[in-house]
Image: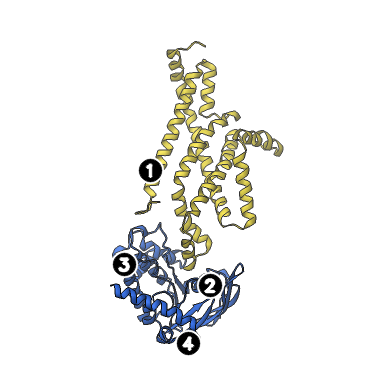
Amino acid sequence: MKDSAMPANVPVLRIENIKKRFGDKEILKGVSFELNRGDIKAIIGPSGGGKSTLLHCINFLTLFDEGHVYLNGIEIDHANKRELYAYRQKVGMIFQDFNLFDHLSALQNVQIGLVRVKKIPKAEARERAVAELERVGLKEHMNKYPAELSGGQKQRVSIARALAMDPEVMLLDEPTSALDPELVGEVHSVIQKLAAGGMTMILVTHEIGFAGSLAKEIMFMDEGVIVEKGPPRKILYEASQARTREFCDKIIHFHHREDDQE
Amino acid sequence: MHFSITAGLKAVIEGLPYILGGVWVTLVVVVGALFMGLVLGTLLSIAHVYGNRVLRGLTGLYVWFFRGVPLLVLLFLFYFGLLGALHLDLSPFFVSIVVLGLISSAYQSQILRGAILSIPEGQLKAARAIGMSDTKAITFIILPQAFRLAIPGWSNEYTIIMKNSAVTYALGVAEIMARANHVAARTYQHFWLYLLAGFIFLILTYAGTKLLGLLQKRVAIKGYAR
């Protein structure tokens, strides 16, 4: 949409055969997929299955041993620092534990990338940061420091911080799993708003209900491979692989039990 | 030596302006050494935390050396040994600042290293994730927090350097101790003059730690208790 010159069939992000080992443990055994503009894909699967490592590899926070990453059809060479830093601005990352900069106010957290990375003049960057915070509903809290914010507010600041860099893709690594249950909703609704705005996203999550309502495709990942992928309904209720069925049954039951108690 | 309060007080009062003149010398030596220690120590701590194996080894060696050798030995080694060998003519004042600064940098690097390591690693990841280089992330994200966390350690370092600066008297630096010694030798009122010197140091260490305590409160991050 943004680059009209770009052929429509080139995926925004393409991951090809990523392999990663830590010591003698193979965490990723060759993972490939692609995202078209506006795609939302969710990754589910048991802990230790490589989901988080995969997201970290996609923006080179963890360096993989083999494989390729393409943005708009162009392979990213992480050894070229300038290229890497430009790429990372295009691929926003949201972490499980927010990782806000503790010494900066909400506003400064969003502003600092604009000033120090994008070299936008301070006043203009401030305006932009305020707008991003407004987008996540935190304008009135913009002068608070991370320690003064709730978990949900912190995660929304971190989303605003990523959005300020004007990303083409967002990687969300269990964005609500560190939150108290009553704070999950506010973060989910911000993510839904992003989705409605057409943001391309990869969402790693344990919240299968949310994943199912948001994503067009769910990928089930276990032991370093994408075991199976497909539309939410198929993966959650009619998976073809035993491993997928076993996992989905467990968490669906768990969620139903939780619902019963309410 | 006959012990007389009046003679003692007389020597103290007469010697006071001269000895107080040494306060400035002491302060310049201490502040100069602390500043040099801060600049070098910051670089060393970064090398120690983020450097490769060679860099870590070298900083470790540096810290090991300057923490392990006594100040007096280093002062003599540099002033009488090194300057002679290099045919350099530098003042004892300057050499004292440099030697104290080198020692302080070793300690300060360790204070700051601890402070850096106590900052959650995720913040560095988050800085990288918005496209910051490691240099920017360290400059704008890590160090501003590490410096805050290091203030209590610095307070301690300040008192140590302040007290150790008295040893530079051995090179003939006209600081507080040297001047007290000088007056004592003239008036034979050693007890009173060393007491005075001790008292001046006490005030200087107290004022410095108070000042750093105020700084710590002033730069504290809101809502943040660690």
The chain to which mark 2 is attached is A
In the shown orientation, is residue A96 left or right of residue B174?
left
Measure the alpha-carbon separation of dots 3 and 2: 30 Å
In the shown orientation, is residue B154 left or right of residue B88?
left
Going by the numbered disc 2, the residue's amino acid type is Cys
The image's colouring method is by chain
Check disc 1 and report its element: helix, strand or loop: helix
Question: Residue B178: image x %, image y %?
Answer: 54, 26
Q: Earlier in the sequence, mark 4 or mark 3?
A: 3
The reply to whether dot 1 and dot 3 touch (C-beta < 8 Å) is no
Provide the residue designation for mark 2: A57
Check disc 3 and report its element: helix, strand or loop: loop
Q: Nearer the viewer, residue B21 or A204?
A: A204
Going by the numbered disc 4, the residue's amino acid type is Ser
The chain to which mark 3 is attached is A
The chain to which mark 1 is attached is B
Whether marks 1 and 3 lie on the same chain? no
Provide the residue designation for mark 4: A240
Measure the alpha-carbon separation of dots 4 and 3: 43 Å
- Disc number for residue B214: 1
Q: Nearer the viewer, residue B193 or A219?
A: A219
Q: Residue at x 37, y 79 (%)?
A: A195
Quarter of the image where the N terminus of chain A is located: bottom left
- Disc number for residue A138: 3
Q: Nearer the viewer, residue B164 or B116?
A: B116
Callout 2 crowding tier (Cα within 10 Å): few <14, some 14–19, many ≥20: many
Quarter of the image where the C terminus of chain A is located: bottom left
- Chain letter corresponding to the colour blue: A
Q: Earlier in the sequence, mark 3 or mark 2?
A: 2
